Image (tube, rainbow, N blue to C red):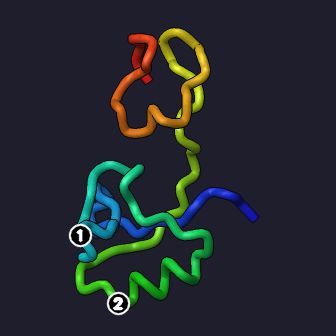
């Protein structure tokens, strides 16, 4: 069993299901996506969705090291859009 979470993606595979201000919304950033531990939970939630969607398992973990400088990234860099050392992620 994989430790990677399950997400709900929109019909054209460009956005993720999230909850924004208590309402369902589509977001581009996977860090903002609703991530579920069990596939059956994602399937149950997707069944209630009025928009076309499908279930995907996130297979690539979030980056842990900067591609430019190679240094380890602190956890709080999630969603910051760049390496705190000035490089690209």
Q: Secondary structure at mark 2?
A: loop
Characterize the local packing of mark 1: few (<14), some (14-19) or many (20 or more) Cα atoms within 10 angstroms: few
Quadrant of the rendering where the N terminus is positioned: bottom right
Separation of marks 1 and 2 at Cα, in angstroms: 18 Å
Residue located at (37% from left, 39% from top): 79
In the image, taking residue 11 as reference, residue 72 lies left or right, namely: right
Q: Dot 2 corresponds to which residue?
A: 48
Characterize the local packing of mark 2: few (<14), some (14-19) or many (20 or more) Cα atoms within 10 angstroms: few
Number of marks drawn: 2
Residue located at (49% from left, 77% from top): 42
Residue located at (27% from left, 78% from top): 52
Q: Foreground: 25 or 51?
A: 25
Q: Dot 1 corresponds to which residue?
A: 21
* Between discs 1 and 2, the one toward the N terminus: 1
Q: Foreground: 53 or 66?
A: 66
Give the answer, above or below, for where 58 lies relative to 10. Answer: above
Percent across and percent down for residue 37 are 61, 69
Residue located at (55% from left, 25% from top): 73
């Amino acid at each position: 069993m994989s430790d990677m979470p399950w997400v709900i993606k929109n019909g054209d595979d460009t956005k993720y299901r999230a909850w924004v201000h208590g309402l369902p919304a589509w977001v581009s950033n996977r860090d903002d996506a609703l991530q579920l531990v069990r596939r059956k939970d994602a399937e149950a939630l997707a069944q209630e969705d009025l928009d076309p969607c499908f279930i995907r398992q996130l297979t690539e973990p979030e980056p842990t090291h900067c591609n430019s400088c190679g240094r380890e990234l602190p956890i709080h860099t999630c969603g910051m859009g760049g390496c705190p050392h000035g490089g690209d992620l």
